C-alpha cells in the first residue's frame, strides 16, 4: 500500500468479509519500490507495526494493489487478536473480540482493569486514508 509521503508498506490481509471489512497486519520498513508477493515470505504477526480492522476502499479504488495470495497460508498462524477499546469519558477499558471468520462481527466485549490489559491493537474500523497516515508516521 502507498504511504502518504513516498514509498510503500506491506500488508497481509488475514480475514475478510463480503461487505468489505478486513483484518490486516501491516509491516515496515518503508519500501521505496512497490512490494512483491515474495516480500511477504517469512513475515510473522508479531513483526507487524500495525494490526487492525479496516475498510476495503483503498483496494477497491485501486490505490492499494493486491499482490496475490500466499501459496502456503496457515490461517491459525495469523489469528484474530483481542482488540482494546478505551472509553475516554468513563476511563473504562474493554477487550473486544471479533468472530474469527468475520472481522465485522463483534462477539464479546469484556471490561478489564487498566494497565497491561490495555496493551494490544486498538479497536475500531480504520479507513484507508487513516491507515496510510498512521503507517507513514510509524515508518518515518
Image (spheres, rainbow, N blue to C red):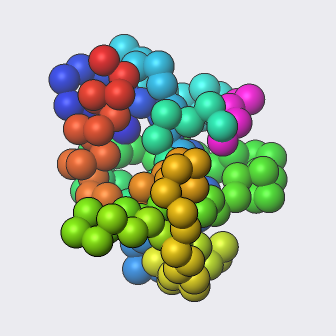
Question: In the image, is 36 to the left or to the right of 138?
Answer: right
Q: Position of residue 96 (x, y in %)?
A: 52, 71
Residue 60 visible at all: no
- Eyeballing the image, is 88 above or below 136? below
Q: Main secondary structure of the magenta part?
A: loop
- Eyeballing the image, is 95 above or below 51? below
Question: In the image, is 134 to the left or to the right of 95?
Answer: left
- Eyeballing the image, is 21 above or below 25? below
Q: Position of residue 127 (x, y in %)?
A: 26, 58
Was residue 112 drawn as part of the magenta stretch in this picture? no
Question: In the image, is 58 to the left or to the right of 116?
Answer: left
Q: Residue furthest top?
A: 32
Depth check, front residue: 106 or 33: 106
Q: Residue at x 24, y 48 (%)?
A: 130
Residue 111 visible at all: yes
- Eyeballing the image, is 76 above or below 39? below
Depth check, front residue: 27 or 108: 108
The quadrant of the image that shows the C terminus is top left
Q: Residue at x 35, y 28 (%)?
A: 138
Please state the extent of the stretch shown in magenta in the rendering. Answer: 41-45
Q: Position of residue 112 (x, y in %)?
A: 55, 68
Q: Position of residue 70 (x, y in %)?
A: 69, 45
Depth check, front residue: 43 or 68: 43
Amino acid at each position: 500500500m502507498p504511504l502518504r509521503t513516498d514509498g510503500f508498506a506491506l500488508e497481509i490481509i488475514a480475514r475478510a468479509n463480503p461487505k468489505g471489512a478486513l483484518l490486516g497486519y501491516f509491516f515496515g520498513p518503508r519500501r521505496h519500490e512497490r512490494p512483491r508477493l515474495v516480500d511477504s515470505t517469512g513475515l510473522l504477526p508479531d513483526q507487524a507495526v500495525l494490526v487492525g480492522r479496516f475498510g476495503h476502499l483503498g483496494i477497491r479504488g485501486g490505490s492499494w494493489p493486491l499482490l496475490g495470495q500466499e501459496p502456503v497460508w496457515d490461517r491459525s498462524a495469523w489469528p484474530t487478536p483481542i482488540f482494546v477499546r478505551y472509553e475516554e469519558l468513563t476511563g473504562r477499558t474493554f477487550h473486544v473480540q471479533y468472530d474469527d471468520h468475520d472481522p465485522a462481527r463483534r462477539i464479546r466485549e469484556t471490561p478489564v482493569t487498566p494497565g497491561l490489559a490495555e496493551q494490544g491493537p486498538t479497536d475500531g474500523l480504520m479507513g484507508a486514508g487513516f491507515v496510510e497516515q498512521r503507517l507513514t508516521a510509524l515508518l518515518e
